[in-house]
């Protein structure tokens, strides 16, 4: 089915839904790299006007990537609850946008409909939204998950403590963990991106984090972000694996480039569930995504990068993760050129994930060769705080010395907590108070008050 719209006597034609979605996307370097972006702002507006008149039923009925050749498409189609979707199927994309913005469209309604929102529907409506629309609707979406604590509750912001080290040095990692915990970071996760893929080295990292969690009774979870096959080997070897991590994408071919498929993800999840290491829940998976990953693998099938990203959330949703993280500016300026594009992409990703029922957090980040700086990240961080983001990163000094990119610091989380009044995950908050890291008002105690924990963790650091 083709689409067309006339502006100032010029008739703009779009051959199919895939083309229409790509042309309606806000400008970004990745879509131009792929040769699918709108040539002009007027063509983009014509595409949006066309898209606004397409019904949600028609979007669901027209898979962008063939069912027969793509297991992500099959997952989206086979899991789609037609009875729930029937409530909104007749709406156009424009009408759906307006309905989402209504005060009467509340948290309960959105939670009920989330399983029926396909990635293509979420992506389509996001393309008609201003940034403030993305913030307002995402704030109404509530996704709660549990492992050793409870994430995603109203008024709560969690932090992944990211203690990376360029040589996986145990003392350096332990020092970063100590630093983060004393700033109240780590309720989302203590998660290490390792430099090595040696099971011997990785095993030491798992054991270090587990010792911290067990010795100091920290109600949080750990993860070593190595390839999922390495984590399967670790579980087989009896190592203390809490969450299973994997980078995922929105097409079968892109996932194949990562060395994964849906069956492998299911195998790893089943193994992690069998370990029964969670204390308050069984959400055992942790996924990371990012706009441009399918394009960078030449596995996007002509689909725009934001829609491909939303399809990755369908993969994540299938495995009931504790956390999903869009590493929004990490992939580089070839895909998101500058601060404006990174900010827009972060808000789109957060909106689409939450609308689909995925516990989405964001690594508010950029690489040093992008046209972006820390002021851009402050803007995105603040907007995501207003949108109710589930969690952010906590990197010492905001400068990841292993991955060589700029993210958010422990202080950035303190800033968000101060201006929005956010709490930690409740179990973690109670632990912070019990360990005298926080006072009764939820503020950081003096270092002297935190001294007992400081001494214990310091001893562990020296022993590492």
Image (spheres, rainbow, N blue to C red):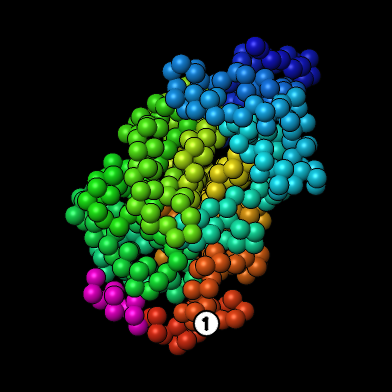
Q: Nearer the viewer, residue 16 or 452?
A: 452
Left or right: where does residue 434 sit relative to residue 62?
Answer: left
Spot occupied by residue 212 in the image (x, y as percentages of width and height): 34, 69
Which residues lie in the magenta part?
455-464
Q: Residue at x 63, y 39 (%)?
A: 114
Q: Residue at x 52, y 67 (%)?
A: 427
Q: Nearer the viewer, residue 48 or 204?
A: 204
Q: Image height check: is 194 above or below 76?
A: below
Predominant SS of the magenta segment: helix
Q: Does residue 385 show up?
A: no
Q: Image height check: is 285 above or below 32?
A: below
Q: To which quarter of the image does residue 174 belong?
A: bottom left
Q: Image height check: is 311 above or below 418?
A: above
Q: Is residue 161 magenta?
A: no
Q: To which quarter of the image does residue 413 belong?
A: bottom right
How many numbered discs sit on the rendered protein? 1
Which residue bears the numbered disc 1? 445
Q: Residue at x 35, y 35 (%)?
A: 264
Spot occupied by residue 371 in the image (x, y as percentages of width and height): 51, 46
Q: Residue at x 35, y 31 (%)?
A: 257
Instruction: Kindly give the residue lying farthest to the bottom in the view shown.
Output: 448
Left or right: where does residue 287 sit relative to residue 115?
Answer: left
């Amino acid at each position: 089915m083709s689409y067309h719209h006339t502006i100032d006597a010029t008739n703009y034609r779009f051959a199919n839904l895939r083309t229409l979605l790509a042309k309606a996307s806000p400008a970004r370097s990745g879509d131009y790299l792929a040769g699918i972006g709108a040539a002009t702002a007027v063509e983009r507006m014509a595409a949006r006007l066309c898209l606004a008149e397409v019904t949600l039923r028609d979007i669901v009925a027209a898979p962008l990537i063939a069912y027969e050749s793509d297991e992500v498409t099959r997952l989206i189609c086979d899991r789609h609850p037609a009875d729930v979707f029937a409530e909104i199927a007749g709406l156009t994309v424009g009408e759906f946008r307006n309905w989402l913005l209504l005060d009467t469209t509340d948290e309960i309604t959105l939670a009920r409909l989330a399983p029926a929102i396909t990635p293509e529907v979420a992506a389509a409506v996001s393309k008609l939204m201003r940034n403030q629309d993305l913030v307002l609707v995402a704030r109404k979406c509530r996704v709660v998950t549990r492992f050793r604590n409870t994430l995603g509750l109203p008024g709560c912001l969690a932090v992944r403590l990211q203690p990376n080290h360029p040589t996986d040095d145990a003392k350096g990692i332990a020092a970063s963990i100590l630093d983060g915990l004393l700033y109240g970071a780590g309720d989302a996760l203590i998660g290490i991106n390792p430099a090595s893929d040696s099971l011997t080295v990785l095993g030491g990292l798992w054991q270090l984090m587990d010792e911290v969690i067990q010795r100091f009774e920290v109600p949080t979870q750990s993860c070593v972000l190595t390839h999922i096959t390495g984590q399967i080997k670790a579980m087989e070897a009896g190592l203390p694996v809490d969450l299973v991590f994997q980078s995922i994408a929105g097409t079968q071919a892109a996932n194949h480039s990562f060395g994964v498929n849906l069956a492998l993800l299911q195998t790893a999840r089943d193994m992690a569930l069998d370990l029964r290491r969670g204390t308050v829940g069984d959400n055992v998976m942790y996924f990371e995504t990012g706009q441009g990953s399918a394009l960078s693998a030449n596995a996007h099938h002509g689909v725009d990068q934001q829609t491909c990203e939303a399809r990755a959330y369908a993969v994540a949703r299938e495995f009931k993760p504790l956390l999903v993280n869009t590493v929004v500016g990490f992939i580089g300026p070839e895909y998101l050129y500058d601060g404006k594009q990174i900010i827009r992409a972060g808000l789109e990703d957060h909106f689409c994930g939450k609308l689909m029922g995925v516990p989405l957090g964001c690594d508010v980040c950029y690489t040093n060769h992008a046209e972006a700086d820390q002021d851009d990240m402050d803007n995105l961080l603040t907007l995501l705080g207003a949108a109710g983001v589930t969690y952010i990163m906590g990197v010492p000094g905001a400068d990841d010395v292993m991955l060589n990119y700029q993210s958010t610091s422990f202080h950035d989380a303190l800033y968000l907590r101060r201006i929005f009044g956010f709490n930690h995950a409740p179990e973690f908050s109670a632990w912070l108070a019990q360990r005298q890291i926080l006072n009764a008002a939820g503020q950081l105690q003096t270092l002297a008050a935190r001294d007992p924990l400081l001494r214990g963790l310091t001893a562990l650091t020296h022993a590492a």
